[in-house]
Amino acid sequence: MGKALMIIVVGFSTIFSVVMFNLSANQSRSTDAIAIQYEKWMAQNAAESVANVAASRLIQDFNNLGTLSGSFNGATYSTSVAKVTADSATQAKRIRVTAVSTFGKESDTTIVELMQPAYSYYYYLSRDWPTWKTFVTGDTIPAPIHSNQSIRISGSPVFLGKVSSTNSSYTVVVSASPQFFGGAEFGCSFVPYPSLTGLEDSLSAFGHVHNQELWVMFNGDGTFACSTATIEHTNNVADYQGVRTTNDKHLHVEGTFTGQFTVLSDENLYIEGDIRYLTDPRVDPTSTDLLGLVAQNDIIINKNTDLEIHGALLAREYVRVPYRSSLPIKTLTILGSIGQRNGEEFSVLGLGYNLTHVYDDRLRAQTPPYFPRLFRATDGRPRVELLYRSK
């Protein structure tokens, strides 16, 4: 009996020892897994934090390309800062920050890309938000918009680009549940309407300048005809960065365009007919045709017919369409971006027009030559937008 009891006790002891060994091994593996996950979290948090610090420095001073390195709470970190594109005639400056951190045996990387946009970057920008313009259910806005007043929303429109406004919220017209997939920044800083001095100077140096009222016809073969009251001649688009008038003279434009060019009127810019890219980017995304249409005063669509306009529109005052009160309904298609001080004159609803506004996605990173860049109203420094974040 005693021998049998001893065998039983030894057997239980052996079983218990094996169970405790396995339990201890499992606990050790669990502890190791928790420790590894903790190190991963700490490395990730450190990388994201130092990327935020580097991005904040660039937002305050977009020319600050200094790097960061050091250690904090056991994590070591470093950043590299590089220009993706230089600030050129046709590309806004983009800067990429790469932040790397290590905690214990684990490392992590966060990438942030920032850009100083041009005014052509916005799908729609208005200093004074028009009372007639309300985003409603069924609207899908593909690119950034900004207003220095409150944006009007009714229903559940979808915004794929960033929405920003100086007001603390949007205006609810009836009821609103918008979807801001591109992010929203309400209560942001005022976006001043641009001085066109830089564009004027650039086109005076690299463009075709007239001090009389000017008519420009794009011919679709890389040339454009210029006509005034006294002269008429044909030029190659490739020989110039754009064309402008001086002395408060109007400019009239139409035709089929190929190349990269900016048209600047020192008074009103009259659109006298279709303005179409030779290579439509909706059909061929590799299109390099890019046109800026800029007016010191108004951009006036001067035809009471169906029209299609390709380009980045920027008016220091209004974009205007001719008044219509009778049928048949005319169609107006704009492929590009719209910037204006006030949109009240752009109302096409109820006036016999059907407006279709299609964003040219290339304008996120490219600009027509010397198109004005955005600066902050408070201190004159570049306004910086977040383009990309890896986490």
Image (cartoon, helix red, strand yellow):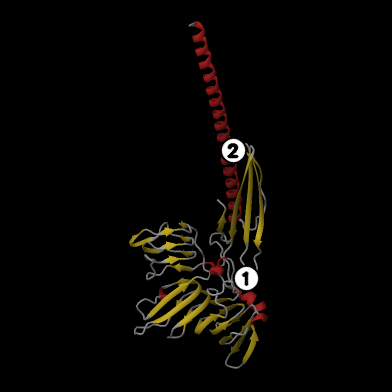
* Residue 55 left/right relative to 174: right
Residue at image x 57%, y 86%?
216
Q: Residue at x 63, y 58 (%)?
A: 95
Q: What element carries label 1?
A: loop
Q: Residue 176, relative to residue 221: is it above or below?
A: above
Q: Which amino acid does label 1 sit on?
A: Thr
> Which residue type carries mark 2?
Glu
Q: Write down the quadrant of residue 210 in the picture.
A: bottom right
- Picture coordinates of residue 176, whole percent (x, y): 35, 60
Q: In which quarter of the image is residue 112?
A: bottom right
Q: Name the residue under label 1.
A: 90
Compared to residue 5, the image places residue 146 above or below, namely below
Left or right of 62, for residue 341? left
Where residue 220 appears, as percent x and y from the top left, is 59, 84
Q: Disc 1 to disc 2, how far (Cα)?
A: 44 Å
**Residue 206, how many percent across, how many down?**
67, 78
Residue beneath label 2, please? 39
**Numbered tag placed on residue 137 in the rendering:** none
